[in-house]
Image: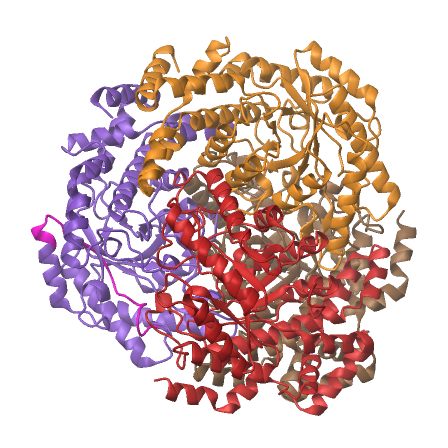
Chain colours: A red, B orange, C purple, D brown
């Protein structure tokens, strides 16, 4: 990807999509930021592959932040680290600790990073009967307190984004009374909400399956929406790409949330089976989602309109840092594609009722064009490597951590 | 299914579920009513099977009402006929006519029937560019007017239930601006709503696919819910079992709508592939849905709480009247199962955290018990045949219509 | 479920389905056996629920066999224990040991149990790059040797059934050359096959997803079939209900395997999301599968025609022993339903082209009838409790193991 | 898309993928041919949209061939026309006529076209009880005779490719005995096969759903494979992209068929919901499929190794000729992407176990690169327009047929 290659590519893009659109795409890419989750950098269970973890994984929060800082230095797009209260700010894995969070925030600062989205950890030990709908009041209270603490950390130490996900639901028909579960969830959410600053953007994540299978208490965007609206203006939905039925039209969910002016957020990852939590590939779905976000002013936009973006991926086998840089790169490419769509030609084709031509104009940007030059240019203008993954491979960092972290 | 068989069956049900529950189930079955759609009784295209239609189909509205009346006489559960404006109340297939509707209503009466749910026909000729989101204002106006007329027919002549379904959406990415489509739908709905009596229960149907494939403008219950709430208290969602992703948990949608106090409706049918519109089988899903409806007071309940129920099926190959009676029977069985669940034992098992036992108690009613005796008893108490399909087969009606309607 | 209740139920079943069919169903239930997997009884990771395991889990192979024996004593249907080489017959989790297997077999015998189906453990530690298609020849050799050992254990100590499942595949497009993977799998299978006795029934399991997501090397029954045929007559397919796309018609796979005379096997469990490995419920799908198996002479049949049946479930939250007994009960009920289908009436309805009537006749056995009396009678004739789960609950066993196994 | 734009694009492709690969891609695109189905050009029912057909549709076989010839002249890739016996070679819609076929062949020739793949029409009128498994022997005989005639037309007049698809199956459980259906299909296939020349490549199409829903008699590639193998060497499987469960890995099916040396065929189209039969978009799935086909020597290869390729799409709303040209263009793009994959770098990354890098190398060709210059160059070297759809729009042909064919 040398300078000439980039220039020729840009010339072709200018010729096809117009310089203004292409340069706006460059600007958008320069602005885009996505949280890197601390947990992806640590030892993530290989699951069926036994106790395997890809070599060089970070053994503690300091090493995680070292890796995150290295990634941010290469990509310029990952200055914020997403955290989980019980994984990152807890002594015993049962309760969070504000002081630890403050210390982690300081460690971030010293590496040029910030604390990004914060989540209470409502799964893990002690959640076997649920969290916000646990039949036992003491258990619910424990999770509410953790959630309120997470809200305070988000407000005082982080970027004012609080992400909520609950493992609650049921494995078998009859196990719970579905309607009661929903009502209890609503009530416990209200309880938590009332104790959290209105300055915090609270995002309610939905998930159609897993860990419960027959029912999950917030299965779809509709449920998240209704619950969010029942709380207040500072509450939105949290979309994770792997949390839907296969072939769901996620870009349409984005469009409706934008139309309804519900500021929301994304957990990016990719899935082939169900909720695979794999690294993002620059596919059409991602580009179509970014098209809605970009047209709706929710990305590379003003802080008050920008949605919250976070990677949420787990690398059981693949190199974790490769996987994160690859995802950031894929999001950059998707955003660039979205930004160059020739909306004038598109409108014209639509006005003429020319279905195939409209589709072709859309796909010329989203599928056919090579937007790597746009992304490369954006990076170079920020004095960053054109290809951050290549730069990572050449840096020797992986070798170093494999040897240091034995 | 002789008297003895029924009595022995009832004895076993009493012994297992208690006489009170079982007799309540009998009462519920006696009360349950479901609309029979006029279109199912006519010539419904065999699709891929060419121009085949199952023999004896009704050739006009009078024959449809004859068949409906015969079905009602056998089942006691189908006194209302659902109609479509352009199929049933139109001279030209483009506009509805109140006078025709009045005449059909009178024909119903003379057969002991009533006009049930009414729908404007927003698909068929002239809808190729959409209905409520057609780019052309005149087209939208035409569909709004038809919808308002349908509302008036529902209010003055029918059971005050208006069902809305729109074929609008897109086949290919880029064909429409998804967000604009949603906003236009919302606007056109508001326009129609403002001209319809608040006494009418308006139901917004959603459908994830078809006839458009890439996007449908109201794809899921969440969208229907948000749109319904944006209109007013007399608007609900219309659930059709075949309009979801496979393995969607529809009973949970019911539970949430009930929790949110949105009075809604059902189009019953069954599907193995996608939206097959086949006759209902008495499977667990149906029983689980009825469990939520029954517990929520939405079935066999007071007129103001009862949801609206309609069959929506098409019989390309199978005998149409068999298929309708089979569906009614299946709904009766499902309701009976739902009504006998031993909720006391269930609560106890849940309180003890016994997951498998709770599931077994639930399944004992929903899967294991034979509830045909309950349904037979309910019918016999209304002086109806215990097995209406057997009665139909023996009646000679099919032979008669095949010969009369050549 | 007292004697009277059972008698009345049997009378009703006799009246509807004929005494011959119903008594044949009783005999079939008496004969049916299914392997209980040792692993389900141990500590099975709670996954997302943290380190939770349902209380009283077996801490070692002896306790697992104690539990299995208790289950067999209550159900009379679970005399065989399925084992995994690296979980049950290995010192280091990397290699199997014939002597340990012999010892486990002896422990089985002393408890009235037998060694059932044996599987090499091709996942867990060391499989992160695959097993039979691992790029590294030494790794492949290790798994081939383990497989051959498993074959020897199955032949000499077990029931001569060897089940093979491979985690091999890829997470991302491009990761492997798909065609090469398939060819290497075929080759490695051949290598293993040639060293295993022809007396062993070898079953090749397929799985559409997981642990790999983009591709699994044996994704569907077709692939398993082609590979099995390429080896020899003593090789079949292994069907696990959770290993398909949602709404796959598994009973049709059974029918085709029977038509092609490929003796095969089943891993029973149930799933709501994907491969949930939950306890079996007595639903229609199970009954339809048993209908094919029963009509094809593959169940409750002669040893040479009988397929191999095994539970394969994991109980993260629900009581493990409840879950196993529930599954066995569900299989019994499903078999009983399959056996009573009135195939004479069914043929007649089909001959007359009466689609709905055929479906109703089928469903009368598979959905509507209450077959618990059949299963209860079968058990009582074997001097077993009519309801083995109730008997388990009353036995005090759970309390005992919870206290003993702290 | 001017010359300069193309040259710059080619330069960038040379730089990234090497001149050899890129020029091989140009050659492959020049060679690629795909059958155009006559039916797509005619009046294809708008389905739910009523009797709408996109304007200018061909009213008879002559007009269809006129359109096909125009498309071929613009694309140089569509010299063969696929036909259906009862749609194209029949007087009464019930029986085929060799003489009509000969006449159509002559009409093709006079327009520079050839007769491509031929299919008996086993659906449409008279197939309501099935075709090859119809219970009535006379019906089966009728379809066998039509199939044998189609084989003779394929052999003597066409390109020696015969495609078979059957609507047979069932709508409801119990309607047919699944195993008997399979065995009857096998038998009827054998009967037909024995009367068809061994020079004809016979392709058996599978389809998981529709028009039957509960079961289709050849639901998946495995069934097609087993049936094909049971007939002879000249029989393969026919893959239609819309005939699978959502998210099926179709490229893997291709890879296995290639590994098993079963020469097969493709019906190209795209689907968002189920079997939508829409125009092909140049998405990753298409590129991944072409990667397997190209690596396996099944595309742009020798006549004896080349698979059979056909479009199978229906345009209810979109311009039919646009849709066909778009599909051809998309196949060209997909083939070009497949051909430039840097397999050397890929092998190296795989050898090093670098999962993410292998995926990125793969995606650089399949997703990131802009291959429109390759396709444009291939066309220009054949003296064809670089963008055939643009050329069509400019040609005035659409206006002409809309006016001529009123």
Q: Does residue A128 appear left or right of residue D70 in this picture?
A: left
Q: Position of residue C105 (x, y in %)?
A: 12, 58
Q: Is residue D7 something one can see in this rendering? A: yes
Q: Position of residue B331 (x, y in %)?
A: 51, 26
Q: Does residue D366 appear left or right of residue D61 in this picture?
A: left
Residue drawn at x 54%, y 25% as measured from the top left: B299
Q: Position of residue B378 (x, y in %)?
A: 46, 15
Residue that lies at the very extreme toward the left in this rendered image: C110
Q: Is residue C352 something one can see in this rendering? A: no
Magenta region, residue range = C108-127
| Residue A288 against residue B369 in the figure, above or below | below
- Residue in the foreground of this view, choosing between B70 and D357: D357
Q: Quadrant of residue A162?
A: bottom right
Residue drawn at x 64%, y 76% as measured from the top left: D368
Q: Does residue C1 appear left or right of residue B111 in this picture?
A: left
Quarter of the N terminus of chain D within the rendering:
bottom right
Q: Is residue C126 magenta?
A: yes
Residue drawn at x 52%, y 27% as measured from the top left: B297
Q: Position of residue A233 (x, y in %)?
A: 65, 53
Q: Is residue B81 magenta?
A: no
- Residue in the foreground of this view, choosing between A260 and C67: A260
């Amino acid at each position: 990807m040398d300078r000439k290659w980039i220039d020729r590519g840009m010339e072709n893009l200018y010729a096809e999509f117009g310089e203004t659109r292409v340069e706006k795409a460059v600007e958008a890419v320069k602005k885009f930021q996505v949280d890197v989750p601390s947990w992806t950098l640590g030892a993530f269970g290989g699951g069926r592959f036994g106790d395997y973890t890809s070599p060089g994984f970070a053994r503690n929060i300091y090493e995680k932040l070292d890796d995150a800082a290295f990634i941010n230095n290469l990509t310029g797009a990952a200055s914020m680290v997403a955290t989980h209260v019980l994984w990152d700010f807890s002594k015993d894995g049962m309760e969070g600790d504000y002081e630890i969070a403050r210390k982690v925030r300081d460690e971030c600062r010293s590496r040029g990073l910030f604390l990004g989205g914060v989540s209470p950890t409502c799964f893990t030990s002690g959640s076997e009967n649920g969290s916000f709908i646990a039949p036992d009041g003491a258990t619910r209270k424990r999770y509410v307190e953790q959630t309120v603490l997470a809200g305070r950390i988000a407000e005082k130490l982080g970027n004012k984004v609080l992400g909520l996900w609950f493992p609650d639901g049921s494995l078998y028909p009859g196990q719970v009374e579905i309607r009661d579960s929903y009502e209890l969830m609503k009530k416990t959410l209200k309880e938590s909400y009332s104790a959290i600053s209105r300055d915090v953007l609270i995002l309610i994540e939905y998930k159609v399956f897993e860990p419960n299978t027959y029912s999950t208490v917030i299965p779809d965007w509709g449920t998240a929406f209704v619950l969010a609206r029942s709380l207040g203006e500072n509450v939105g939905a949290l979309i994770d790409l792997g949390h839907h039925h296969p072939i769901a039209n996620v870009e349409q969910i984005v469009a409706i949330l934008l139309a309804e002016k519900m500021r929301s957020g994304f957990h990016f990852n990719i899935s082939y089976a169900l909720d695979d939590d794999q690294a993002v590939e620059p596919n059409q779905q991602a580009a179509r989602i970014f098209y809605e976000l970009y047209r709706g002013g929710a990305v590379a936009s003003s802080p008050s309109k920008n949605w919250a973006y976070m990677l949420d991926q787990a690398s059981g086998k693949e190199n974790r840092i490769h996987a994160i840089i690859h995802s950031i790169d894929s999001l950059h490419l998707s955003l660039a594609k979205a930004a160059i769509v020739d909306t004038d030609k598109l409108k014209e084709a639509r006005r003429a009722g020319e279905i195939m031509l409209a589709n072709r104009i859309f796909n010329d940007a989203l599928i056919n064009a090579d937007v790597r030059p746009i992304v490369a240019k954006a990076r170079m203008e920020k004095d960053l490597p054109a290809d951050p993954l290549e730069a990572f491979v050449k840096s020797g960092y992986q070798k170093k951590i494999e040897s240091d972290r034995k």
